[in-house]
Image (cartoon, helix red, strand yellow):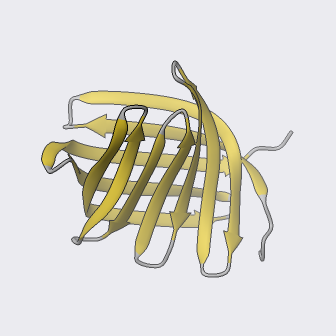
Amino acid sequence: MANTEIPVKINIKTTIDEQETVELIVFGRFYQKENASFLQYEEVLEEGTVKTIIKLGINEMLILRSGAVKMRLPFQLEKEQRGSYELPFGVFETATLAKKMAYHFENKAGFIDLLYEFSLQGEQAGSYHLQINFQEEKY
């Protein structure tokens, strides 16, 4: 499946500190390139449109957001990783510590399960559980 791009329907569920849950359904694209897989989608927020790319590697993940929100969050299991969160009034340093990372893709469907501790400017900002299910969307 070299560079074959498939349109996908994506269900995103984010749980923060096991209390607040945000669910979102969007449409995007999934593709594989070299040694990584990519899930790409856009969401419309009050601030504007945000383009998200999730890069899925062997032992690492990377979430890149651009547009109204600019963010770079790298993940490696049990290793603190530094990233950034850019707001109109400045760039903040982030840190992630992945507690669980799982990714599976088969038969044009897949899931991502990511549990991590998130810090902003050195302050603990919560425990995040990101669960994404996606499958080919036939038009």
Position of the C terminus by quadrant? top right
- Relative placement, left or right, of 75 versus 80 is right
Position of the N terminus by quadrant? bottom right
In the figure, 10 relative to 38: above or below?
above
Rendered residue at 22%/71% (across/down): 78
- Relative placement, left or right, of 70 versus 44 is left
Rendered residue at 58%/58% (across/down): 110
> Quick one: which residue is furthest to the left in this view?
123
84 or 38, which is in the foreground? Answer: 84
In the figure, 34 relative to 5: above or below?
below
> Quick one: which residue is furthest to the front in this view?
89
Rendered residue at 44%/65% (across/down): 61
Q: Quadrant of residue 105?
A: bottom right
> Quick one: which residue is furthest to the right in this view?
139
54 or 88, which is in the foreground? Answer: 88
* Residue 137: x %, y % from top left: 76, 44
Rendered residue at 29%/63% (across/down): 82
- Relative placement, left or right, of 41 versus 72 is right
* Residue 44: x %, y % from top left: 59, 26
Number of numbered discs visible in the structure rendering: 0
> Quick one: which residue is furthest to the top in this view?
46
* Residue 73: x %, y % from top left: 39, 56
